[in-house]
Amino acid sequence: MTFLRVRELVSGYDRSTVLGGVDLDLDAGAVLGLLGRNGVGKSTLVMTLMGLVPVTSGSVLLDGEELAGRRPDAIARAGVALVPQGRRVWATLTVAEHLALAGRGRRGGWTVDAVYELLPRLAERRRQYAGQLSGGEQQMLAVARALVTNPKLVLLDEPSDGLAPSVVDQLVGVIGRMRAEGAGILLVEQDLHLAFAVSDEIAVMEKGRIVHRVDTPAFRRDPDTAHRLLGVA
C-alpha cells in the first residue's frame, strides 16, 4: 500500500477553487520536491493536507487512513507535521517551551534530547525566547517542533526562504536524517539547489494540478521542460 495516496483533491478559499484535482503518491522514507511558479497552489496543497484549508472533494489516505476533511489536530495525531512558510514560531515562548508543548504525549525516537543532539545550536539557545533568535535559528526551531511530534509525514513549505547558504546546507542534512528515520517528506521549495540535493523525485504544479513528475536526475537532464514549466534556465 502506498504510504501517502492523494486522489482528485479539490480545495480553495471561500468560493475560489485553487486545487483542481490533485493526484499524488509518496512512499515512506522518500522526498518529493514540489516546484511551480508563484500562485499555482503549492502552499494551498500543503495547507489542505494539514487540514488548514477545507477540502471540497477528493481523498487523502495516509497509511490507509482517510484524512480528507478532518481537523488539523486529528491530522497531526495521525502523524502529519507541518513546517510552515515563515516559521510561525511564538515569539514569547522559549525554545524549550516550544519543544515541550509540541512533543507532549508523543512517543518515538525524536525526543527533545535527540533533537538537541541533531541541532546543537538550539540546545545552546534553549532558554531564549523565539523572538530573540535569528531567522536561521527560528527555521531550525520550526523543524525541531515538527520532529518532536515523531511524524510519519513532514510537510515543508519553503524552508529555505530568507536563509543564509550555510543554514540551507544544515537543512539538507536535517532532511536527510528525517528520511533516514523513515518519514515521508513533501518539500515545497523555490531553491532548486536544495530541492535537487534532497529530493528523490520532482513534481511540478500548474493551475492547481500536478502536471509533471519525474526522478530528480531526469528532471535535471531536461532543461527545456524546466524552462517551460518554471521559467528557469
Image (cartoon, rainbow, N blue to C red):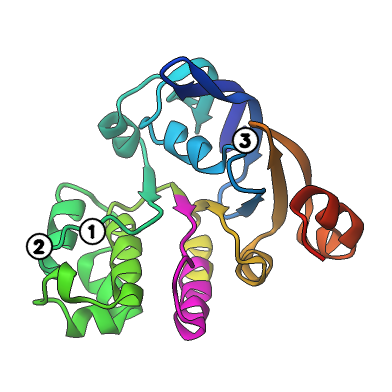
The crowding category of the residue bearing disc 1, from other C-alpha atoms within 10 Å (few below 14, some 14 to 19, many at least 20), is some
Of 61 and 189, the residue lying toward us? 189
Residue under the image location 24 percent in, 78 percent down: 122
Residue under the image location 82 percent in, 65 percent down: 220
Screen quadrant of the C terminus: bottom right
Of 209 and 112, the residue lying toward us? 209
Give the x, y percent position of residue 224.
91, 57
Q: Which mark is residue 3?
A: none
What's the amino acid at mark 3? Thr
Give the x, y percent position of residue 113.
22, 73
- The reply to whether callout 3 and callout 1 are in contact (CB within 8 Å) is no
Q: Is residue 168 visible?
A: yes
Label 2 belongs to which residue? 93
Give the mark, 3 or 1, whose residue is nearer the N terminus: 3
Label 3 belongs to which residue? 2
SS at circle 1? loop
Give the mark, 2 or 3, whose residue is nearer the N terminus: 3
Of discs 2 and 3, which sits in the foreground? 2
In the rendered structure, the answer to whether residue 213 lies left or right of residue 32 reads: right
In the rendered structure, the answer to whether residue 18 lies left or right of residue 127 reads: right
In the rendered structure, the answer to whether residue 15 lies left or right of residue 226 reads: left
Of 62 and 37, the residue lying toward us? 37
- The reply to whether callout 2 and callout 1 are in contact (CB within 8 Å) is yes
Label 1 belongs to which residue? 89
Residue under the image location 61 percent in, 66 percent down: 191
Where are the magenta residues, as a range? 155-175
Q: Is residue 153 depicted above or below 20 in this figure?
A: below
The crowding category of the residue bearing disc 2, from other C-alpha atoms within 10 Å (few below 14, some 14 to 19, many at least 20), is some
What's the amino acid at mark 1? Val
Residue 29 falls in which quadrant of the image?
bottom right
